[in-house]
Amino acid sequence: MAAVNLGRKPAPAASAPCAPGAVVPGATPAAQAGPAHVTEPVAYDAILLAGFGGPEGQDDVIPFLRNVTSGRGIPDERLEEVAHHYRHFGGTSPINQQNRELKAALEAELAARGIDLPIYWGNRNWHPYVNDALAEANAAGHSKLIAIATSAYSSYSSCRQYREDFADALEDTGLGDEVQIDKVRQFFDHPGFVTPFVEGVRDGLVGLEASVPGLDRTTEVEVLFATHSIPSTDAAKSGPGERGFGEGGAYAAQHRAVAEVVMAKAGAADVPWQLVYQSRSGPPSMPWLEPDINDAIEELPAAGRKAVVIVPLGFVSDHMEVLWDLDNEALETAEQQGLAAVRVPTPGTHPAYVAGLVDLVLERVNGTPVADRPAETELGPWYDVCRPGCCENVRLGFRPALAGIAP
């Protein structure tokens, strides 16, 4: 292993290790043949918690944004236009601390169940990087890892890019012949992820009714389910194309399906709602998923709405895009429109969410049959091994990636 490579973001991998006769690079023997769901038990010896990463001081902001935009040739002066979001909070993104707290909560849940699986945490764009985590795990004698990416849905940036990160880290550390990495399924409709949002919507509606006397939730309230916008071309490539998800691909379909479940379970099936998007960063000439949340809020008064519940359905924790784009911009837009507004919590370290992530790991440890795997929508349970061609980045094409059938 080339230790000099640690402490920085790995370069893109030129290839991914693949066992003779296997179709899934870097996989354990149980997953190498590419079954949609792996029902053979696997004796994993560690967990890899994979995050996005974020700066932890003013001096980190521009280097972090260079990592995020690497390969695009974006000058620092343009990066500074985004940097002010972080600088507003002292140059510190909350995401790393949130992942430290999630790691600690997962470790406590594992210990409570008597499960001996150490957790190694690595990020895509800031310290500690995924290659650092792999080196640490390998030095401790661990070679069969099950990965949890801190993203619930299917798209390039929320699934395949994490799988590319694993390939990048294996090549960077030279551990391709020693370490195998599988990944838990996308958990958008797992009860552990859905439950915090159900509670949030229920509490948010009750709170608005208490603060706005005479409020009619069936005509005067709108629930906006917010998620990160992505290029329409990438959205169309999310999930297996043969399933025919339509406009927005699996990414939009998964969000809509979960939103319907949340509204029903919250006892709010009669409350108007819509799926909206945020955090667009592409050029105006490139179509991205719409409507933008602020545009949607501006249209609510004309529809007779007096209040809005904002649900960060696409996010697992209160990181920068929640704090800035929702708590700052969206709530300000609601105030300007004279709307009472509440933003409900993300899963964070909610006990149901933490327990659900451990359950997802145990699905693979135990080889749980598909019929015994919980899923709140008809779209799931999602695949253990990503299908061929899933979540292509239209701009970059297929780069080496683990935990899925090549490409």
Image (cartoon, rainbow, N blue to C red):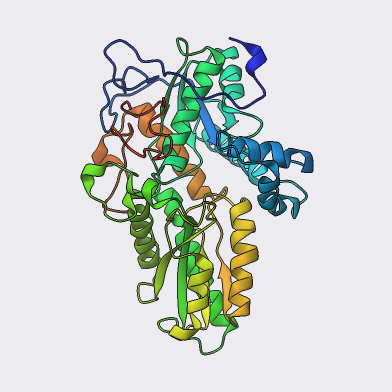
Q: Residue 134: which quarter of the image?
A: top right
Q: Decide: is 321 above or below 395.
A: below
In this rendered view, identify the residue nearer to me: 130 or 260.
Answer: 130
> Residue shown at 60%/60% (left/top)?
325
In this rendered view, identify the residue nearer to me: 64 or 77.
Answer: 77
125 left or right, relative to 150: right
Q: Decide: is 310 above or below 232.
A: below
In the rendered image, is residue 115 in sight?
A: no
Residue 71 rendering spot, x and y as whole percentages: 55, 33
> Residue shown at 41%/25% (left/top)?
400
* Number of residue marks: 0
Indicate the quadrant containing the N terminus: top left, top right, bottom left or bottom right.
top right
Q: Decide: is 129 above or below 375.
A: above
Residue 70 rendering spot, x and y as whole percentages: 58, 34
> Residue shown at 48%/20% (left/top)?
45
Indicate the quadrant containing the C terminus: top left, top right, bottom left or bottom right.
top left
> Residue shown at 40%/32% (left/top)?
362
Residue 286 rendering spot, x and y as whole percentages: 45, 53
Q: Residue furthest bottom?
A: 214
In this rendered view, identify the residue nearer to me: 282 or 201.
Answer: 282
In the rendered image, is residue 25 in sight?
A: yes
